[in-house]
């Protein structure tokens, strides 16, 4: 995405991730589509979601939809998916971040009742702003929008 356009939409991406807590995730498991409403968090350019129910089989891809409450801004990603094991250190980091983002009562429920924590790696995305502006996003666009200070530091270090 050209830098001039990115500067226009990066704040929309950041605001959306700060305001939205839930996402809709569509996956295909054993040939059957499944749709999950889940709390999400981003860490290092990947999304982590606790699924409220265990999928029928291991999902390989998913479509993630994040919307603002006023529905003026919508972000969708096609992402590869993998289930995290409880023994994985990343599981602990993602679970802690999800607990902080969730309501306290919901966090305790998720940790005990939701057996599946998915890591979603964005492949290609789409941002719609005000229902008339539509932009294609790459995973690097997501990283630049969510972690602008990191990029500034890297540029300054050069």
Image (cartoon, helix red, strand yellow):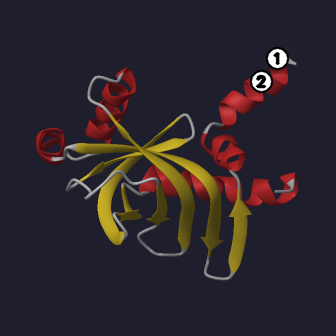
Residue drawn at 68 percent across, 37 percent down: 148
Q: Quadrant of the N terminus?
A: bottom right
| Front residue (pair 11, 111) | 111
| Front residue (pair 97, 34) | 34
Circles 1 and 2 in contact, beta carbons < 8 Å? yes
In the rendered image, the vertical position of residue 10 relative to residue 112, given as above or below: below
x, y percent for residue 129: 63, 72
Q: Which residue is mark 2?
A: 154
In the rendered image, the vertical position of residue 61 relative to residue 45, given as above or below: below
x, y percent for residue 152: 76, 30
x, y percent for residue 5: 81, 60
Q: In the rendered image, which quarter is residue 133 located in?
A: bottom right
Q: Which residue is mark 1?
A: 157
Residue drawn at 52 percent across, 42 percent down: 46
Q: In the rendered image, which quarter is residue 35 located in?
A: bottom left
Disc 1 from disc 2: Cα separation: 5 Å
Classify residue 93 as left or right of residue 51.
right
In the rendered image, the vertical position of residue 36 relative to residue 114, given as above or below: below
| Front residue (pair 29, 137) | 29
Residue at the top extreme, as displayed = 157
Q: Residues within 10 Å of mark 2 (few under 14, many from 20)?
A: few
């Amino acid at each position: 995405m050209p830098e001039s356009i990115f500067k226009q939409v990066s704040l929309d991406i950041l605001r959306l991730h700060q305001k939205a807590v839930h996402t809709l995730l569509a996956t295909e498991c054993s040939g059957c589509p499944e749709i999950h409403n889940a709390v999400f968090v981003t860490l290092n350019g990947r999304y982590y979601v606790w699924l409220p129910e265990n999928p029928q089989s291991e999902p390989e891809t998913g479509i993630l939809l994040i919307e603002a409450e006023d529905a003026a801004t919508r972000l969708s990603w096609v992402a590869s998916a993998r289930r995290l094991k409880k023994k994985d250190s990343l599981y602990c980091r993602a679970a802690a971040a999800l607990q902080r983002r969730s309501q306290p009562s919901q966090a305790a429920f998720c940790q005990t009742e939701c057996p599946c924590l998915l890591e979603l790696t964005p492949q290609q995305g789409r941002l719609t702003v005000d229902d008339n502006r539509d932009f294609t996003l790459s995973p690097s666009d997501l990283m630049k929008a969510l972690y602008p200070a990191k990029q500034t530091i890297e540029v300054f270090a050069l």
